[in-house]
Image (cartoon, grey):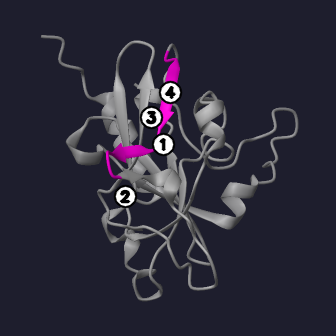
C-alpha cells in the first residue's frame, strides 16, 4: 500500500525553502481515477495540459509501481482486430485517430509473477499516440511513470475539454483517498 505523500513542494533540508516545481507540476494539472473498473488500488493519473492534451500515466499507488514488481511485457493489441499501435494520426484535425471512451483499454501489462493489468483511457478523446518506448523498455513505467513511462496521449473534443474532469479526482482529493487507504486496516481473512 502506498502511504507516502505525493506531490507538492519538497523542502530543501538545509535552508527550508521550496524547490522549483518539476515540468509536470508547472504545465500540467494532475487528475486521478481511483480503483478503475472496481479494481482496488489500480489507479490511473491523467496529466491535463492547458492546450487540452491529456497524458495517461499510472498513479503512484498502482500495483505495478510497488516494490518487488517486475514488468515482463506491454501489449497494445487490445483484441484480434484492434491494436493501438495501428493508430495513424495526420493533419490539424487529427484525422485517423482512434476515438476512445472512458473505459476503452489502452494496453495490457504483464508481470513476471503472472499478474496482468489493463490500463484504460479514463477520458473520452482521440488517441494521438501511444508510448512505443515502453514496449522495448518496460522498466520506464516504474522508473519514470509521469514522463518517459507514460502510456498514451489523448486529445478530448473541444466542446468536452472542460467536462472531462467531472468523473476524476483532483490531486488533493486523491491524497485523501490514499490517506484513507493507509488508515483502513486491511482484511486478512
The image position of residue 128, as x and y in percent, is 56, 66
In the image, residue 54 sits, relative to residue 66, either above or below, namely: below
The range drawn in magenta is 69-81
- Dot 4: within a 10 Å radius of its alpha carbon, few (fewer than 14), some, or many (20 or more) residues? some
In primary-sequence order, the first of circles 1 and 4 is 1
Q: Are marks 3 and 2 in contact (CB under 8 Å)?
A: no
- Dot 1: within a 10 Å radius of its alpha carbon, few (fewer than 14), some, or many (20 or more) residues? many
| Of labels 3 and 2, the one closer to you | 2
Q: Which residue is mark 2?
A: 122
Asked where in the image residue 108 lies, by quadrant, the reply is top left
Q: Are marks 1 and 3 in contact (CB under 8 Å)?
A: yes
In primary-sequence order, the first of circles 3 and 2 is 3
* Distance CA(mark 1)–CA(mark 4): 19 Å
* Distance CA(mark 1)–CA(mark 3): 5 Å
Number of the label disc, if any, that sits on residue 61 = 3
| Residue at figure coordinates x 50%, y 27% from the top left | 73
Q: Which residue is mark 4?
A: 73
| Of labels 1 and 4, the one closer to you | 4
The image position of residue 181, as x and y in percent, is 32, 33
Q: On the rendered image, what quadrant is the C terminus found in?
A: top left
| Of labels 2 and 4, the one closer to you | 4
| Viewer-closest of 118 and 79 | 79
In this rendering, position of residue 182 left or right of residue 128:
left
Q: Which residue is mark 1?
A: 59
In the image, residue 93 sits, relative to residue 54, either above or below, namely: below
The image position of residue 170, as x and y in percent, is 44, 60
* Element carrying mark 4: strand
| Residue at figure coordinates x 59%, y 35% from the top left | 135
Determine the residue located farthest toward the left in the rendered image: 189
* Element carrying mark 2: loop
Amino acid at each position: 500500500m502506498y502511504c507516502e505523500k505525493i506531490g507538492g513542494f519538497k523542502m530543501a533540508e538545509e535552508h527550508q525553502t521550496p524547490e522549483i516545481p518539476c515540468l509536470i507540476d508547472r504545465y500540467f494539472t494532475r487528475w486521478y481515477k481511483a480503483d478503475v473498473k472496481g479494481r482496488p488500488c489500480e489507479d490511473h493519473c491523467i496529466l491535463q495540459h492547458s492546450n487540452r492534451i491529456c497524458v495517461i500515466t499510472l498513479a503512484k499507488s498502482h500495483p505495478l509501481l510497488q516494490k518487488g514488481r517486475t514488468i515482463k511485457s506491454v501489449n497494445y493489441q487490445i483484441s484480434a482486430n484492434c491494436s493501438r499501435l495501428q493508430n495513424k494520426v495526420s493533419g490539424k484535425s487529427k484525422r485517423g485517430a482512434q476515438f476512445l471512451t472512458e473505459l476503452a483499454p489502452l494496453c495490457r501489462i504483464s508481470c513476471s509473477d503472472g499478474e496482468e493489468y489493463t490500463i484504460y483511457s479514463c477520458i473520452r478523446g482521440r488517441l494521438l499516440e501511444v508510448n512505443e518506448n515502453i514496449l522495448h523498455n518496460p522498466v520506464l513505467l516504474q522508473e519514470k511513470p509521469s514522463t518517459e513511462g507514460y502510456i498514451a496521449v489523448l486529445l478530448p473534443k473541444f466542446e468536452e475539454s472542460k467536462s472531462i474532469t467531472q468523473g476524476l479526482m483532483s490531486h488533493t482529493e486523491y491524497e485523501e483517498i490514499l490517506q484513507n487507504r493507509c488508515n483502513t486496516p486491511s482484511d486478512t481473512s
